[in-house]
Amino acid sequence: MDNKVIIFSAPSGAGKSTIVSHILKNHPELEFSISATSRAPRGQEQHGKEYYFFSADQFRAMIAEDKFIEHEEVYPGSFYGTLKSEIERIWSKGHAIIFDIDVKGGVNLKRIFGENACSVLIKAPSAEILRQRLTGRGTDSPEAIERRLAKAESEMEFADGKFDHVLVNDDLETAFAEAEKIVSAFLSK
C-alpha cells in the first residue's frame, strides 16, 4: 500500500463516520485509525474500538512524551489526537489507513503525509440539516449542539481550499458512491 492514508474530515453530524464505515466494508486493504481523546465515551463507545479514551492529564503527559503525530485541544480540556503507535500498527500489517477526523486534524494530516494522503471534506447540505442531524443523534445537550454548530461554521471557513475533494452529503447513497470513486481512484495509483 506504500503507506497511503485516506482522510475523511467533517464537522460533527455531516456523516463522515457513516461514510467511513461504508468504505471499510468494501476495502479490506484499509484499516481504521483509532483516535485518542480526553472526552468521555458516548453511548456504547469502547476504549480501543471507537477511540482510545484518556483523562486530560494523561493526554497532556502523552503530548509531552511526543506520542502523537498530531493533536488538538478542540474545546477547553477536550483533546483529540492521532497516536504514532496507531500509524505504525496499521502500516506494519501492510494496510492503508483511513481516518475519520475533525477538519483541523484532517488539514494537519494532509500536510504531514502530503502526496501519500487523499483528503476528503464532507459537508452537510445546510446548517439547518446539520442541526437536525445533531439533535436526532440524541447524544448531546442543546448547549453542546450549539457549540458544535459554531465550530462547524468556523471549520468550513478554515477548510476552504485545503482538501483534495469536497463531498456534499445530501443523499447518503450518492455520497457512498462518490466516496467509493475517490477512494478507489486513490488506492489504484
Image (spheres, helix red, strand yellow):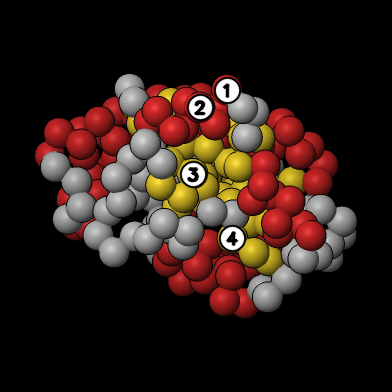
Q: Earlier in the sequence, mark 4 or mark 1?
A: 4
- Picture disc at residue 64: 1
The amino acid sitting under disc 2 is: Ala
- Picture disc at residue 32: 4
- Picture disc at residue 36: 3
- Picture disc at residue 61: 2
Q: Nearer the viewer, residue 109 or 44?
A: 44
Disc 1 crowd, CA 10 A, few/some/many (<14, 14-19, 20+):
few
Give the x, y percent position of residue 146. Answer: 20, 33
Disc 4 crowd, CA 10 A, few/some/many (<14, 14-19, 20+):
many
The amino acid sitting under disc 4 is: Phe
Closer to viewer: mark 4 or mark 1: 1
Q: CA distance from mark 3 to mark 2?
A: 13 Å
Give the x, y percent position of residue 15. Answer: 41, 56
The residue depicted at 59 percent of the width and 54 percent of the height is: 33
Give the x, y percent position of residue 176. Answer: 52, 68
